[in-house]
Image (spheres, rainbow, N blue to C red):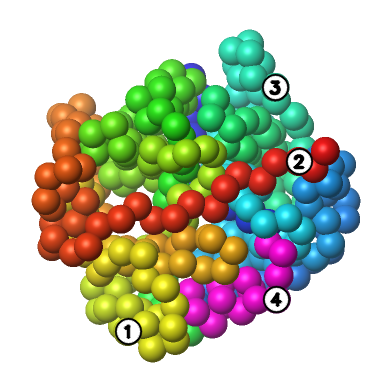
Amino acid sequence: MIELIDVAYVRSGVADLDKAVRFATEMVGLELVGPADIGADQADRPGQERGRSAQLRADGRHHCLALVEGGSGVISSAFTVADEDALAAAETELERAGFTVSRGSPAAARERRVRSFIGFDDPFGNRIELVSHQVTVTKPVQLTRPAGITEFGHLCLDATDVREAYRFWSTHFNARVSDWVGDAACLMRIDPVHHKLAVFRGDGPGLCHMNFQVATIDDVFRNWHFLVDNGVGIQMGPGRHPQSTAIFLYFLGPEGFTYEYSYGVRRIEDDAAWRPRTFDPEEPGSIDMWLGPQRKPSTQPQLRPAG
Ligand SMILES: [Fe+2]
């Protein structure tokens, strides 16, 4: 059993780096911490990552989003494990289970601001990285605009079969289902937060959305007006998820990358007492208890290595 400690980062490939960075800073509000050349990265994912990249920060993590110039599409989604021993044990367990696992080079680990990492594809083709010793930065976060972001909250992947996805995450990892939305979504926790990982049913692998928590309900609504005033496409919300009780707003960034702000996510402190519930996606209010227009946020497809 591999114990995931937390979400670590998302790496997303963009054809237009400058535009994607402008959106992530000026619209989303993230802090730009470092454009860096990542030529050394090519050894890990040949043909996929090249040229320039940018790192964006939302909380104590050195960065939680890396935008990488090249092909358009999500490159990987990462979780932290406890330490080097835990990472080595995870590598062994995944290999024994039949997954092809690759070790990141020292240069690629430095670029990610982690000590070591491994990468593998989940059964649906989502590229996952497990990292040890992600760097924490103490300097206060300087959001580009006052969006109220407090942390990278969760990530959501697509899979063609949500039940099978849960089998994967609960067999090899410490993920436990918090709630089901029929066969359309599985919301999983790896700590008391209602979900740090979600899997939505989709046509293929990809990142459905990346979530940022904000400090107050007012931030959700202020951000909503700000985004609408700036012509940003709202995908869903403001609304309230009955599962996590979070007040949400999904909106679309460049190259099909969906961001989410949310406030007020449920914490499950008594793990043993929690019983996962099932919500029928066809029932009114099952996604948004305020009964707003519902549609699945659009997914940024998984980028495959060239050739
Ligand atoms: Fe979400």
Q: Is the residue under label 1 in contact with that under label 3 (CB below 8 Å)?
A: no
* Distance Cα–Cα, label 3 vs label 4: 34 Å
Mark 1 residue type: His
Which residue, given by chain and number where applicable, does mark 1 sit on? 225
Q: Is the residue under label 2 in contact with that under label 3 (CB below 8 Å)?
A: no
**Which span is picked out in magenta?**
14-28
Q: Residue 18 carries which label?
A: 4
* Distance Cα–Cα, label 4 vs label 2: 22 Å
Under circle 2, the secondary element is loop
Q: How many marks?
A: 4
Residue 241 spot, x, y in % from top left: 21, 54
Q: Residue 100 carries which label?
A: 3
Q: Which residue is drawn at 52% across and 38% down?
A: 204
Residue 247 spot, x, y in % from top left: 24, 63
How packed mark 2 is, by other alpha carbons closer than 10 Å (few <14, some 14-19, many 20 or more), is few
Q: Which residue is drawn at 42% across and 73% down?
A: 233
Under circle 3, the secondary element is loop
Q: Earlier in the sequence, mark 3 or mark 1?
A: 3
Report whether the residue tagged 4 is closer than 8 Å to ligand 1.
no
Which residue, given by chain and number where applicable, does mark 2 sit on? 305
Q: Which of marks 4 and 2 is nearer the N terminus?
A: 4
How packed mark 3 is, by other alpha carbons closer than 10 Å (few <14, some 14-19, many 20 or more), is few
